[in-house]
């Protein structure tokens, strides 16, 4: 793994990748990365069915893969509003269960999951995405029922179950003004109550031009100031036309597929390869500059074909967000990043 001296360098693995079906992929991962995160298989709604039954197959195979290749492993994620069944929060008549009942479910969940992999996973994304796009606390079932305690208690339980694990709060867009400040306020409030937290995960789903690296740098500095280690947990660079900042008249079409929103179906033109390489170079320059504050940079995937950004926010597009192409070959961006070492 190329960047070991500066920080851990990781990749999110989908369930298929950890089953060693494609030896070329396994070799690539073991050679290029030294940390792994499960892309989906440790999420509540993937690991458990609506009745709460556990299916450990993929999570176990993830941990076995990491153990076999001696990789640093991050658990993702214990408490999140997404990819979880409504049944966790609601009675049969649709009303919310009580705070005490949800607290009990949370305890059982974290104790079972973090307990199973204690000593194997080095770190956990304990709570994911608790701050809303409106910069208030996200209006999730968790928050509705438990308030701030859903975060405080999740970290406290995780710390009790696995006292050696590095515990992180993880969120997107916190490398930008606005959500950065809202998140800092929330973390200060919770730290004041004595919440055991060690790290901050900046997901890092960034655009080809935005946010500017100066913004990202501000966030690294601000989060480190809270006494937290900084992690880039889900880095990728979306090269397709953004539908987040459309003119008002077009906002209602945001999630519609249009050919002009999918311009690179036949491959990424060289000029865009260059732009992507430059973007990654600029990002890693900042990461290296602040390597005293950063523990890890993890990519959200390995090769472009398997990236979630082919399907988000519009399904059926062809995206090029990562360092390895659809033939498993390193892209220009890969060499530009390595040149910085
Ligand atoms: C994404 C996965 O990559 C997709 O396969 C899945 O369909 C949805 O979730 N923030 C997170 C990740 O914390 O868990 C999300 O992963 C991407 C956004």
Image: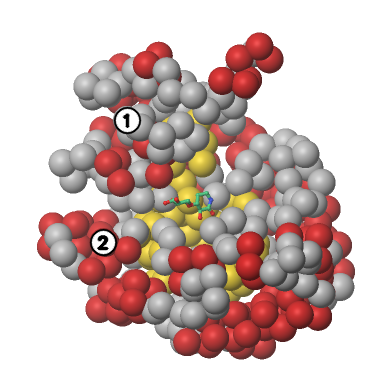
Please, which residue is most extreme toward the front here? 93
Q: Between disc 1 and disc 2, whose residue precedes?
A: 2
Label 1: state its secondary structure.
Answer: loop
Q: Position of residue 194 (x, y in %)?
A: 82, 76
Of residues 238 and 30, the one nearer the viewer is 238
Q: Residues within 10 Å of mark 2 (few under 14, many from 20)?
A: some
Name the residue rendered at 48%, 59% in the picture: 296
Task: Give residue 153's position: percent from left, percent from top.
Answer: 75, 76
**Colour mapping:** secondary structure
Residue 322 in sight from this viewpoint? yes
| Residue 191 badge | none
Circle 2 sits on which residue? 17
Q: Quadrant of the N terminus?
A: bottom left
Label 2: which secondary element: helix
Q: Which mark is residue 318?
A: 1
Q: Residue 75: give x, y in percent of width and height.
A: 49, 70
Q: Residues within 10 Å of mark 1 (few under 14, many from 20)?
A: many
Q: In this view, does 69 lie above or below 273?
A: below
- The image shows a total of numbered marks equal to 2
Residue 6, picture quadrant: bottom left
Percent x, y of residue 43: 50, 66
């Amino acid at each position: 793994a190329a960047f070991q001296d500066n920080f851990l360098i990781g990749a999110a693995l989908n369930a298929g990748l950890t089953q060693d079906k494609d030896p070329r992929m396994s070799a690539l991962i073991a050679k290029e990365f030294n940390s792994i995160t499960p892309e989906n298989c440790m999420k509540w709604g993937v690991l458990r069915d609506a009745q709460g039954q556990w299916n450990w197959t993929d999570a176990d195979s993830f941990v076995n893969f990491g153990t076999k290749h001696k990789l640093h492993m991050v658990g993702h994620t214990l408490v999140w509003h997404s990819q979880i069944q409504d049944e966790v929060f609601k009675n049969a008549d649709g009303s919310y269960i009580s705070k005490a009942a949800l607290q009990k479910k949370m305890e059982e969940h974290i104790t079972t999951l973090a307990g199973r992999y204690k000593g194997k996973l080095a770190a956990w994304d304990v709570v994911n995405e608790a701050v809303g796009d409106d910069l208030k606390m996200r209006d999730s079932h968790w928050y509705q029922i438990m308030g701030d305690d859903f975060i405080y208690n999740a970290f406290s339980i995780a710390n009790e179950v696995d006292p050696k694990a590095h515990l992180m709060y993880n969120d997107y867009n916190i490398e930008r003004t606005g959500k950065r400040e809202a998140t800092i306020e929330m973390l200060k409030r919770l730290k004041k109550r004595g919440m055991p937290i060690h790290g901050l995960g900046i997901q890092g789903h960034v655009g080809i031009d935005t946010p500017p690296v100066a913004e990202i740098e501000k966030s690294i500095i601000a989060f480190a100031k809270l006494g937290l280690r900084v992690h880039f947990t889900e880095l990728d660079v979306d090269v397709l036309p953004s539908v987040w900042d459309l003119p008002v008249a077009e906002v209602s079409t945001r999630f519609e597929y249009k050919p002009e929103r999918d311009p690179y179906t036949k491959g990424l033109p060289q000029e865009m390869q260059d732009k992507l390489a430059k973007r990654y170079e600029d990002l890693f320059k900042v990461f290296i500059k602040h390597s005293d504050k950063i523990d890890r940079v993890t990519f959200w995937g390995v090769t472009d074909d398997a990236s979630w950004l082919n399907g988000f926010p519009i399904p059926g597009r062809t995206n090029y967000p990562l360092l390895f192409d659809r033939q498993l070959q390193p892209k220009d961006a890969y060499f530009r990043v390595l040149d910085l070492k």
